[in-house]
Amino acid sequence: MHTDTERCVRAVQSKDARFDGWFFTAVLTTGIYCRPSCPVVPPKPENMVFHPSAAACQQAGFRACKRCRPDTSPGSPEWNRRADLVARAMRLIADGVVDREGVPGLAARLGYSTRQIERQLLAELGAGPLALARAQRAQTARLLIETTALPMAQVAFAAGFSSIRTFNDTVREVFALSPSELRARAPRNADRPTPGALSLRLPFRAPLNPDNLFGHLAATAVPGVEEWLPHCLEGAGGTPVGAYRRTLRLPYGHGIVALAPQPDHIACRLTLGDLRDLPVAISRCRRLLDLDADPVAVDDRLRTDPVLAPLVDKAPGRRVPRTVDEAEFAVRAVLGQQVSTAAARTHAARLVTAHGEPVDDPEGGLTHLFPSPEALAALDPGTLALPRTRRTTLTTLVRHLAEGELPLGAESDWAQARARLLALPGFGPWTADVIAMRALGDPDAFLPTDLGIRRAARELGLPSTPAALTARAAAWRPWRAYAVQYLWATDSHPINFLPA
């Protein structure tokens, strides 16, 4: 979009927050870059240049605006609606792969040469993988500086910098302030949690309907790994609000997150065993709640169908509830085949108790990390209270996951992953597509054989047979996964309601 100068100028002059994260405005006369909704008086059009990423602005020598804080914009929705090389690379960079494995590690995961990846990222985003990772480190550093009392040396290494000098130079270059000046600008009365516990806000593009998003996560929560805890976080005006909580398996350790919907953000509290996991934890929480989606584009498309239009108008901004761990969700999808939500939770809870890694949670009832594929690969199939065919399906899945023969992650190509899943015994279209939709993030995944979808189709006068419904749903592409959420919402199932 950044190449459409006229459209970008209109968005900046109208301070349209819908375009935050789509592009960034660099002002030639001030050397500052902003998000489109920056509250200051817009510059003259001839003084604006537009870039596709914050990293590209920084590469061009611009520093971040202190008013609109463009480094904290929602992520571009492009990376959630595409499965090409650039989109998969961006998802991996957000997951911290470059910081942990370098550009060669990024290339190895994607199956391309480092030169190809650098060339494509530079062509589309104006910055290579190192610059994009550097921009993310700067954002993480700012968050730690402003919300914790950690010594600057600890902040530097927790944010992923290799030296304190690089940390100081980067912060000065990006924010035009030293780390100590950034901390001094933070509100004096700001809540500074103890080291390892962070309170932050996750931005999103409005509208956001939290009912099916948090309702689904709460209704399907696996005991010991997830829970809905009333009066967990502090909401607007200091009022306690309920929150979805869960354990996180992270590269350097484990964590616990609490998430609660607020009118203009998602309240997030993270407790981490190792602060180096902060950017990865934030990225996974954003993916879990589908916070980088563009709800206006989605809803506008679905409103073109006269059957869906009333559902969209009644409760716009529905998101697709996703996951923080693709392998975990694949296992849970198999456990949920042809059983109720309660039965699926029971099966998953048994696996957690027998094979999960224990964690301490002084705040609530979280007790374990969900078992890793390696731990589940060693289980005795005879201990599973499942039909024999389902046991075979589960054990085959975890073996392929543990041995790396079935890569499911941010780097996955959706079509290839779906084909590999369908090749496994016991995997049909429903299981493959629900994994594609909720684990891999395919916005066009569709579930025409799902019982809830077929029931909603009959009530709304849509075709109820899978083939006919799929043909009708072609008009909803590329947002059929969101259409699934609106169709599910016609039912009175607990997944559609925000817990009290």
Image: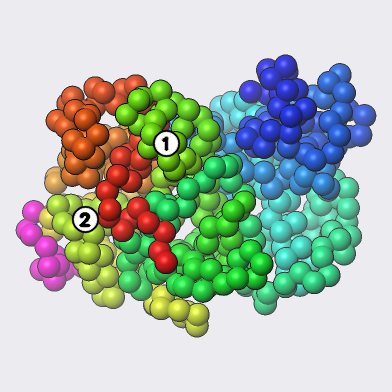
Residue 385 is covered by the magenta coloring: yes
The N terminus, quarter of image: top right
As drawn, the label of residue 336 is: 2
Q: Secondary structure at mark 1?
A: helix
As drawn, the label of residue 353 is: none
Question: Vertically, is 108 above or below 191?
Answer: above
The C terminus, quarter of image: bottom left
- Snapshot quadrant of residue 121: top right
Q: Amino acid at mark 2?
A: Gly
Looking at the image, which residue is at 16% across and 56% down?
339
Question: Vertically, is 473 above or below 291?
Answer: above
As drawn, the label of residue 312 is: 1
In this picture, which residue range is highlighted in magenta? Answer: 378-389
Q: CA distance from mark 2 to mark 1?
A: 28 Å
- Snapshot quadrant of residue 200: bottom right
Looking at the image, which residue is at 67% across and 37% down?
17
Looking at the image, which residue is at 26% across and 65% down?
345
Residue 268 is situated, as x and y percent measured from the top left of the image, at: 58, 62
Residue 320 is situated, as x and y percent measured from the top left of the image, at: 41, 45
Q: Amino acid at mark 1?
A: Val
Looking at the picture, tell me which residue is in the foreground, 248 or 109. Answer: 248
Question: Vertically, is 98 above or below 49?
Answer: below
